[in-house]
Image (cartoon, grey):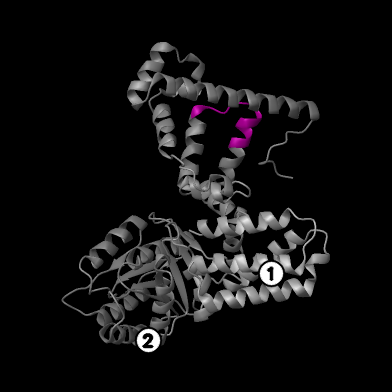
Amino acid sequence: MFEQLQTRLGTVFTRLRGRGTLSAEDVDVALREIRLALLEADVNVKVARDFIARVREAAVGQEIWKSLNPGHQVVQIVHSELTRLLGEAHRGLVAAPKPPTVILLVGLHGTGKTTTAGKLALHLKKQGRHPLLAAADLSRPAAVRQLEIVGQRAGVPVVSPEGGEDAVALARRALARCRELPGDTLVVDSAGRLHIDEELVAELARVREAISPHYTLLVLDAMAGQDAVRMAEGFHRAVPLDGLILTKLDGDARGGAALSIVATLGRPILFIGTGERLEALEPFHPDRIASRILGMGDVLTLIERAQEQVTAEQAKELERKLRRAEFTLEDFTQQLRQVRAMGPLDQVLAMIPGVGSRVRGMDVDERQLGRIEAMINSMTPQERRHPEIIDGSRRRRIARGSGTSVQDVNRLLRQFQEARRMLRHIETLGRRKGKFPMPFQQP
């Protein structure tokens, strides 16, 4: 998502940064190009016009053409206004003073509402909360079964319909069950339709009245573009919304929904879905998304993902092994799995400042990581700890066992040996200077 917008804005800013001075006319030309880029990204016309007006006003107020780095100042102003457009600050789900906190998810069919319910429950569970899922979408065939499967994968209990009860009765029973159990959060997956109709609105109103949710969140497909904005406005008129969850931001959506919906609806985006995995739900941080759009990366989200995969004890143990050059292929496999668990590799690389623009459009073959792991798994424990003993016959066996070639095995071992030599060199320099310069080292 945002790739087309990133490319267009990147071209504009590169041209601005390349000039020592800027005139008011130069800024006007750049702003026209930015406005065109926003419109091509399916941003609402009024939103785009107001955005450009605020950027122009800020540029005039700061007299950027008199500054030493006018191009950089334009980027800073655009970043600030993008952050404001996206909602300024992160909004989280605050626990109710008296548990349980009740969250009602609403939306149309095809937006990923049921899967999002499971993702949200898993996210809350990781925060130490005890969520319960309620399968109140009784209009779509297999929706109940889908939520049961998702709940099982997330390790979260699911309340399913019994004895032909309707959505209102089920929601009431789920709320009572949540109060009985050591549960503190109830996530209700409500009914959806192909479009907003009177029957859907009436059912949602009855469910909402029965459980009095603390949060009513609309699940929207980011791929819908301006249709997403119209759907949000329709739901908000029918059932007052407290926030939104945008799904499928890992797809080919141009980004117009994310950039338009907060301004047009006046409600914050709380979460974004970035993939099919249950873990692929992120809290929405306007400033970080603005940085991604402008190609600045997203280091904070990258760090948070890494912290979810690597504990402090694991980091210290890795530091110890790197200090002593004891890093083995077993350690490398563990690191590989942790990187893959952080999400699709192209997403991870795009969060590194300066790297995102280089990998954009490239075909990042994650299957190569799988082949590397398969080769290491085909080795014996002794071979993983002491790869120097792997001779020709062992290499042929490893290649057969992993479905790769001997050349692939040779390449892996050669690259690993080069990495170990580099680590030994770093460790030697550290001893000479009396200090080991590792990024894991605590001050």
Q: Tell me which amino acid carries mark 1.
A: Asp
The kind of residue tagged 2 is: Ala
User: Taking 326 as reference, is 56 above or below it?
Assistant: below
Q: Residue at x 44, y 12 (%)?
A: 391
Q: Position of residue 69 (x, y in %)?
A: 79, 58
Measured as percent of width and height from the top left, residue 313 is found at 58, 43
Which SS class for mark 1? helix
Q: Residues within 10 Å of mark 2 (few under 14, many from 20)?
A: some
Disc 2, SS: helix
The residue segment tinted magenta is: 318-329
Q: Rounded to the nearest whole Å, what is the CA distance between mark 1 and mark 2?
A: 41 Å
Q: Is residue 40 left or right of residue 32?
A: left
Q: Residue at 56% x, 22% y: name it.
A: 417
Q: Nearer the viewer, mark 1 or mark 2?
A: 1
Judge whether residue 321 is colored magenta.
Answer: yes
Question: Relative to residue 220, is residue 350 drawn left or right?
Answer: right
Q: Place residue 441 in its image quadrant.
A: top right
- The residue at which mark 2 appears reads as 238
Which numbered marker is on residue 39?
Answer: none
Please give left or right for residue 57 compared with residue 122 in the image. right
Residue 93 visible? The answer is no
Is 288 a magenta residue? no
75 or 307, nearer to the observer: 75
Task: Note whether 128 is above or below 100 in the view shown.
Answer: above
Towards the viewer: 260 or 437: 260
Identify the residue at horizontal 44%, vertical 67% (top origin): 246
Which residue position is annotated with label 1? 28
